[in-house]
Image (cartoon, helix red, strand yellow):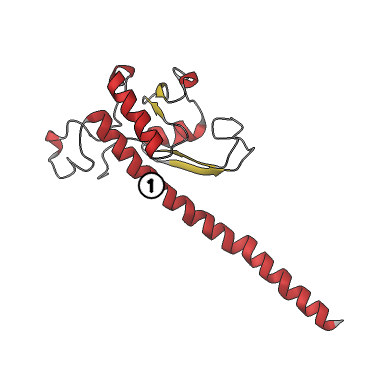
Amino acid sequence: MSIFLICFLIASTLASYSRFYIMPVFSNLLLRNIEKEAERTAEYLSAILLAIQPYQNINLPDSQKTIFGNQLIELKEELFTNNIRERIKEAQFYLHLEKLKFFDSKGKVVYSTDGKDMGIINTKPYFLGQVVKGEKFSKIVKKDSKSAENRILKTDVAEIYIPLMNRAK
């Protein structure tokens, strides 16, 4: 009986250790790696939209920083020409991205790969509290759970919002 009890305690301890320590550490590490890839994707997409190379103007004096300043880049619908839209769709396909949305600094969707989102204004706390201030927001959303925008998702996704801004900051 005591051997059974000892084996049960060891098995319970290992299962608890895995669930409450290993899995959260692994999930955080996975999310950080996904964020890095999302940042590279955002830099690539900003190069498409703004016709600049990532990190191009980081070492310029502030007076010469005309594309990336210390403010968020103001995206407008006019920026998304047919050529730019096609390039974004190609990038979405080759980078295996579920959906791309571009917001102006007030939270209005100025372009989305899902046309239903156009013109919607994001007033969610994560957007106004982090993204508009230049901070990224990310989380893993499991299948059949609600996204940050209150949509029920059909697959597991990493939901990441990255402001286009001076990357040296």
Residue 14 on image: x %, y %: 67, 70
Q: Quadrant of residue 136?
A: top left
Specify whether 22 is left or right of 44: right
Q: Nearer the viewer, residue 32 or 85?
A: 85
Residue at (47%, 42%) from the top-left corner?
Answer: 138
Residue tagged by mark 1? 37
Q: Nearer the viewer, residue 71 or 20?
A: 20
Specify whether 48 is left or right of 31: left
Residue at (44%, 19%) from the top-left corner?
Answer: 118
Please state, as top left, top right, bottom left or bottom right, where the N terminus lies in the image: bottom right
Residue 26 on image: x %, y %: 52, 59
Marks counted in the figure total: 1
Q: Nearer the viewer, residue 114 or 54?
A: 114
User: Quick one: SS at disc 1?
Assistant: helix
Specify whether 156 is left or right of 68: right
Q: Nearer the viewer, residue 112 or 72?
A: 112
Q: Residues within 10 Å of mark 1 (few under 14, many from 20)?
A: few
Residue at (39%, 34%) from the top-left corner?
Answer: 92
> Vertically, is 34 above or below 4?
above
Residue 74 on image: x %, y %: 30, 25
> Vertically, is 129 above or below 169?
above
Please state, as top left, top right, bottom left or bottom right, where the C terminus lies in the image: top left
Residue 153 on image: x %, y %: 59, 34
Identify residue type, mark 1: Glu
